[in-house]
Image: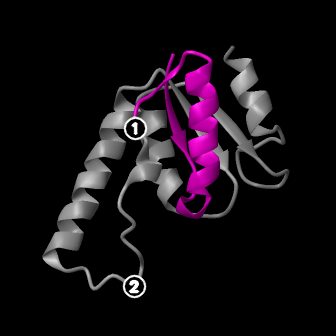
Amino acid sequence: MRLYIAAPWKYRDQARVAGEQATQRGHVITEKWWDHEDITENSTLLPQDRKEMAKQAQADWDGVSSADAFIFLNLAYSEGKCVELGLALVNMLPIFAVGEPGMAVSRAVSTSELTSAFS
């Protein structure tokens, strides 16, 4: 199965682990955004920064659009992952939400339980 894994940027290491676990079980990660260059809030948004941000956004769009399912690691409040969630909804992808109780659209399961579900 082709998967897109979304998570807050500050939890990119957890997303990477989930991606590695899914890959070990034979799944394909459509976009490894956690390997993107870090364009921080403190960036001066020079033309090269804007160009990199546009490149990353297109890669995320393509990753969601080419996925069979969407994994939503709702580990913290953040806006970025919600953009990808919207794309998944528009593309009518199955969405598997993971997060703490009380976080919107999440239920409490561990990443290992989630990836085991795809075995």
Residue at 68 percent of width and 38 percent of height: 97
**The image quarter in which residue 40 lies:** bottom left
Tell me, what colour scheme is on the image? one colour
Q: Position of residue 57 (x, y in %)?
A: 31, 52
Check disc 1 and report the residue beneath it: 31
Q: Which label was assigned to residue 98?
A: none
Q: Between 11 and 71, which is closer to the camera in this rendering?
A: 11
Q: Position of residue 78 (x, y in %)?
A: 58, 64
| Mark found first going from the N terminus, 2 or 1 | 1
Check disc 2 and report the residue beneath it: 42
Q: What count of labels does the image hold?
A: 2
Residue at 18 percent of width and 64 percent of height: 51
Q: Secondary structure at mark 1?
A: loop
Separation of marks 2 and 1 at Cα, in angstroms:
25 Å
Q: Which amino acid type is shown beneath numbered disc 2?
A: Asn
The 10 Å Cα crowd at callout 2, few under 14, some 14 to 19, many 20 or more, is few
The 10 Å Cα crowd at callout 1, few under 14, some 14 to 19, many 20 or more, is many
Is 114 drawn above or below residue 36 in the view shown?
Answer: above
Q: Position of residue 38 (x, y in %)?
A: 39, 66
Farthest residue in the left direction?
47
Find the magenta span and give its range: 1-30
Is 64 drawn above or below residue 85 in the view shown?
Answer: above
Is 90 drawn above or below residue 116 in the view shown?
Answer: below
Residue at 19 percent of width and 80 percent of height: 46
Q: Between 113 and 82, which is closer to the camera in this rendering?
A: 113
Residue 99 falls left or right of residue 87: right
Residue at 81 percent of width and 51 percent of height: 100
**The image quarter in which residue 108 lies:** top right
Q: Position of residue 66 (x, y in %)?
A: 36, 26
Does the segment drawn in magenta span residue 109? no
Does the segment drawn in magenta span residue 2? yes
Residue 71 falls left or right of residue 61: right
